[in-house]
Amino acid sequence: MVSPGTRADDEDLGVEEALALVRENPRRPHEDPGPSHGGPGPAHGDAGPSRGGASPAHGDPGPSHGGPGPSHGEPGPSQRGPGPAHRGSGPSHGTHGSSPGAQRQAGADAARATSSGPHGAARSPEPSGPHHRAKPWPDARAAAERAARSAARAARREPVSVPLDQALGLTLAAPLTALTDLPSFDTSAMDGWAVAGPGPWAVRDEGVLAGHAQPAPLTDGEAARIATGARIPPDTTAVLRTEHGRTDDRGRLHPVREVVHGQDIRPRGQECRGGDQLLPLGTLATPPVLGLAAAAGYDTLTAVPRPRVDALVLGDELLTAGLPHDGLIRDALGPLLPPWLRALGAEVGTVRRIGDDAGALERAVTTSEADLIVTTGGTAAGPVDHVHPILSRIGAELLVDGVKVRPGHPMLLARLKADQHLVGLPGNPLAAVSGLITLAEPLLRTLAARPAPERYAMPLRDAVHGHPHDTRLVPVVLRGEGAVPLHYNGPAMLRGIAAADALAVVPPGGSRSGQEAELLDLPWATAGIGVCFT
């Protein structure tokens, strides 16, 4: 996933820097590196202002008015239900301040203030109110990266030695250096015959198989059957492929093509010599990396440890089995959170359902030893929204208290200890996904010293209406050279994201059809290391 809205030179923590935090001198000060000095990042295109009107409370600004939905069984426009699937929507936190879209386009503020949106209505002035602390979406992501840097310093986390079968998705904390020559002896690249000198050749009765000790040398005019990967007999001239040789009535081998000295022999050290650096520090352990490490003689890898996460699912109305009934609904986030967090590189410890018990929530938060605690719901100001009061009571520092993004506006990030943080997700499922992408992803990626994926953009096939002042994250599928916005993208809905390849970052005011939008890949949609659910 991408970290849009941050400048690569100022805000986006490089792998080298993250690894340095793991290994740095413990006496180095553990202070937070301070606020961002970088601009909010690349432009998402001038979408034009949106229609005026009041901002809805923590919700999506209304159903998608784009063109027809793509395939994946999407039958038509959004059918948002009246009620959330989880609590946490609550009253609006306001949207005071300039929008990310305006920040991303220097000098465009005045034009945006007076220009018309897709339907000719002027943008309404941004409201102010008691909850003006909400951060622009890019700034919230930058704050999560800074928090992780500070936590990495404070935690003094040491690299760990991990068996190869447990290292997928980890970041190498030391270069991968060859422990032997590869191959470690001359081997046959093909099934056929090892031959010495010019043909025809007399064929030995005994062949050469892979995994056997070194065979006896060949003499000129002699050949031996050989299997792929077998050791080459000393004094072999070349390997003659099975399909390139024939035997006569007397059992002598003849070539049917010219034999070139050394053909189809993999010489010792062809790939590397012992001591060669195969991969640099900071490389992500993908399946091919694990295979290369094994071939080079490794049983374990030195890597950055996975950040540990505890997940706390809040809400008395949640069922863990069966159909909804009597005001109770199924818990969608309990099954969703652990694999998503693992895909972000975390080690998931506790997944606990707390309900609406403030005492139980406080005990769970204060006794956790995880690097990150993730809660679902309870982040607004309702009668059973306990997250803010508990954070205040235990003296936590609120780093992000609301984000100018839809869905997911009432998310939060708090520092509990120098090396421990809490991400409070809204209770609505898609809003919670927004919180994972906005706050949990940059924090966990930085703690794990994972590289930030390259940013990319694609044109939207349909227009997407935006919030007047907030960024929108809209599920899309990729079709050729474009991204098709999906319906069923309300805060309480998972139908759109379940069919999506990515999330489009829609700036305040919306995006026109054909306008490029930055895309955030979903971990499993990239066919890369993000599919790390172990």
Image (cartoon, rainbow, N blue to C red):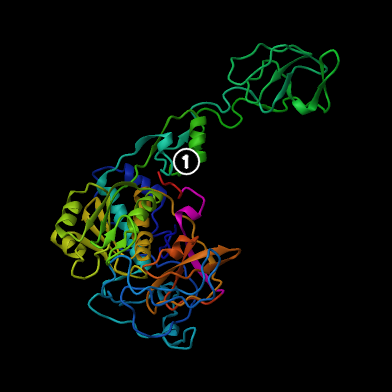
359, above or below 178, in the image = below
Q: Quadrant of residue 1?
A: bottom left
Q: Position of residue 473 (x, y in %)?
A: 42, 68
- 510 displayed left or right of 469: right
Residue ID at (16%, 64%)? 389
Q: Which residue is mark 1?
A: 280
In this view, the residue in front, 235 or 473, is 473
Q: What is the three-letter code of the residue carrying label 1?
A: Pro
40, above or below 172, in the image = below
Secondary structure, mark 1, is loop
In this view, the residue in front, 359 or 161, is 359
Q: Position of residue 11 (x, y in %)?
A: 38, 60
Is 57 a magenta residue?
Answer: no
Q: Quadrant of residue 79?
A: bottom left
Q: Position of residue 115 (x, y in %)?
A: 46, 86
Q: Position of residue 469 (x, y in %)?
A: 37, 77
436, above or below 257, in the image = below
Task: Count numbered badges in the picture.
Answer: 1
Residue ID at (49%, 62%)? 500
- 105 displayed left or right of 158: right
Residue ID at (57%, 74%)? 514
Q: Which residues are magenta?
A: 514-529
Image quadrant containing the C terminus: top left
- Dot 1: within a 10 Å radius of its alpha carbon, few (fewer than 14), some, or many (20 or more) residues? few
In this view, the residue in front, 227 or 486, is 486
337, above or below 274, in the image = below
